[in-house]
Amino acid sequence: MAKAKARKLKLEAQDGEGEFTPRIDVEIAGIHFQNPVMTASGTFGYGQEFAHLIDLNRLGAIIVKGISADPLPGNPAPRIYETEAGMLNAIGLQNVGACTFLEEKLPFLRTLKARCIVNVFGYSTEDYVRCIEILNAGEGIDAYELNISCPNTRCGGIVYGSDPKLTEEVVAASKRAARFPLIVKLSPNVTDIGVFARAAEAAGADALSLVNTFVGMAIDIETRRPRISNLTAGLSGPAIKPVALRLVYQATQAVRIPVIGIGGITSAEDALEYLIAGAQAIQVGTANFYSPDTSLRVIDGIRDYCLRHRLHLAQLIGSLKHGVNGAGEH
Amino acid sequence: MYDEMAQVVENRPLAGRHFLLSLYSPKQARAVRPGQFAMIRLPGRSDVILRRPMSIYDVRSRDLKGGYGLERHGQRPAVLQVLYKVVGRGTRLMAELTPGDRLAVLAPLGHGFFPEEYLAQARDASEVLLVAGGIGIAALLMPARDLARQKIPQRLFFGGRSRHDLVGLSDFKPLVEAITLATEDGSRGYRGYVTAPLAQYLEQRCERRFLILACGPMAMLQVTAGLAERYNHPCLVSMENRMGCALGVCLGCSIRVQGEGHAAYERVCTEGPVFWSNHIVWDP
Ligand SMILES: Cc1cc2nc3c(=O)[nH]c(=O)nc-3n(C[C@H](O)[C@H](O)[C@H](O)COP(=O)(O)OP(=O)(O)OC[C@H]3O[C@@H](n4cnc5c(N)ncnc54)[C@H](O)[C@@H]3O)c2cc1C
Ligand SMILES: Cc1cc2nc3c(=O)[nH]c(=O)nc-3n(C[C@H](O)[C@H](O)[C@H](O)COP(=O)(O)O)c2cc1C
Ligand code: FES
């Protein structure tokens, strides 16, 4: 009896699959993305490094390593340390600088079907504006992601990301300068994410992305020295996912502009949680390091899920129900 | 560089918590050059996420024939070998691998011992000195075989904490003219650091020109680099650093090198792991 029912269900599902093709494309800040899966800044280089490992044309977008107006050398070693299901990093925003990026990195990115988003970093509002002014000349840039949340630069972004007034100031100035839509990347290291989400929205952000890394530490007990030269470092990877998911959910509740979810995503299931919580798109970060095909698996998994549930992505986004399984609703 | 699922052929325990891991992966094995490394992902444990960098110790045929045996039988390499020491969470998991297990391996990585350059330098030298500290030995077997094939005389200086750290000696014996051993506890060879007998050797042969290839702990490499500079010999060092990706994107493996501003750091995974010793800033 139960067996027959199960078979019937399976057949129905198969019939359904034949007719239904889920749409998983999204539009954010006026830009069309073929799917909601992006690679997070600082974890995917300038894209080309992965060209021989995965099909870059299948990605929704590539977000390049944080670019500053002038090249930056970064912090002394050691810069990274693996923790339980995560890693600490204090790279210090080593990057080639805006001009070299335009000359050497952008031409390749321009040839891809994946959108190109440039992560922008500075030490002062003038730095951000100057960097954006240089990058404005770039053909093939689809949007900027303003990094006001890096925890690894002493007098830098974190100050902006943890003061709502400064957040408004730098976002407003960057928005005025920017020729392309502006996504603002928020820090999780704040008491009330809603305050910062609203500050960025009020200052003209076209979208938000979060989270950047959580400030953390690790100590070698034998030498009694910090594991990372910078003392504190940013925590990323699977370990941060539940906390990041909560922050993304709260941000989506605080603003009208689209929110892009980031933090510990290693599978389609992880990504789906963010989408159901209200994120319009997601970014894969640390997982790129140890499993370069993660983003592609996430794309396939999202499509399979939508097919199975006969939903288009747009119907899924923000579809979180209230109450828990077994407590009345299913 | 290929990202492959490789199958464990053998995971042989050696002395002192060392293991020799043999992985069946023909495409990768054929592409390896001396001094290159692999990134190994440990399966089934989600809390150890990053892959671990391991030098490629040797390449073998499917039935684990190696070295001259391989060439004599006209066989092509199909197996990657990794010589490792259990030091922490990841290597402890590696020690549990058994034949048939499959794991993700990214290899070969890094540019290794600059192929043309080091052989040219080696031919100019009266002898190549291989200097290994502990598990650093793992990076030196493939270049040693390369040099032996070219009939370039070489000598191994090998140091460890105790005699249990002196693994792989039988692989080197047919390739080198002489081996000098040192242990910190005096259980074999000189008592003390291997750089002491190396210094003595260089001091007594000031008029000769050597090429030094070194791999081991940072402190040993620094002293070796200092000796090379003092006696004016070219020296290549294979560096270690923590690695996040080995693809050149995380910038976690960068070390200080001669250069200003943005050029002050280079990545061990892509610009290395082998560097000329005078290119490195040893006391940043
Ligand atoms: C290019 C390269 C080649 C290497 N080749 C070999 C090899 O052939 N055989 C071998 O046994 N080891 C090799 N290593 C070192 C090896 O990668 C580390 O021993 C290993 O990653 C430790 O992992 P774990 O999880 O067991 O230790 P963890 O728990 O991560 O750490 C244990 C201890 O090892 C140190 N450590 C962690 N990662 C590294 C690292 N990448 N380099 C140096 N120390 C580290 C930590 O600081 C800590 O003190 C190589 C490293 C590099 C960069
Ligand atoms: C090594 C490393 C470098 C990073 N560099 C940047 C950067 O340059 N700019 C930025 O906005 N975020 C940077 N990030 C943060 C990631 O983009 C991402 O927000 C964070 O890692 C959380 O996602 P994850 O858990 O999926 O890694 C970096 C993260 C790591 C691990
Ligand atoms: S290990 Fe990531 S850049 Fe070298």
Image (tube, coloured by chain):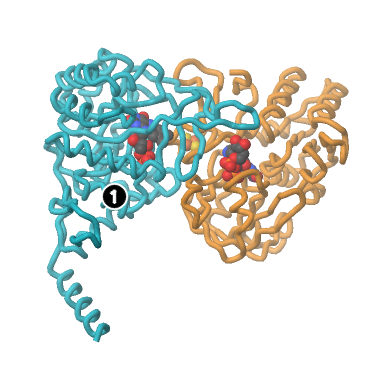
Chain colours: A cyan, B orange
Q: Is residue B43 above or below residue B52?
A: below
Q: Quadrant of residue B55?
A: top right
| Neighbourhood count class around disc 1 (C-alpha, 10 Å): few under 14, some 14–19, many 20 upward | many
Q: In terms of depth relative to the viewer, which is nearer, A184 or A73?
A: A184
Q: Is residue B21 visible?
A: yes
Tell me the residue at 61%/54% (across/down).
Answer: B80
Ligand 2 within 8 Å of the CB at mark 1 = no
Task: Look at the image and tell me in which quarter the C terminus of chain B lies.
Answer: top right
Q: In terms of depth relative to the viewer, which is nearer, A181 or B68?
A: A181
Badge 1 marks a residue whose secondary structure is helix
Q: Position of residue A285 (x, y in %)?
A: 36, 41
How many numbered marks does the figure carry?
Answer: 1
Tell me the residue at 76%/28% (across/down).
Answer: B210
Tell me the residue at 66%/29% (across/down).
Answer: B218
Q: Is residue A279 above or below residue A100?
A: below
Q: In terms of depth relative to the viewer, which is nearer, A7 or B5?
A: A7
Q: Residue furthest bottom?
A: A1
What kind of residue is marked 1?
Ala
Q: Is residue A89 above or below residue B12?
A: above
Q: Mark 1 belongs to which subunit?
A: A
Relative side of A119 to A314, left or right: right
Residue annotated with mark 1:
A271
Q: Position of residue A155 (x, y in %)?
A: 37, 15
Q: Position of residue A11 (x, y in %)?
A: 20, 78
Q: Position of residue A41 (x, y in %)?
A: 33, 34
Q: Is residue B114 visible?
A: no
Tell me the residue at 50%/33% (across/down).
Answer: A80
Relative side of B273 to A189, left or right: right
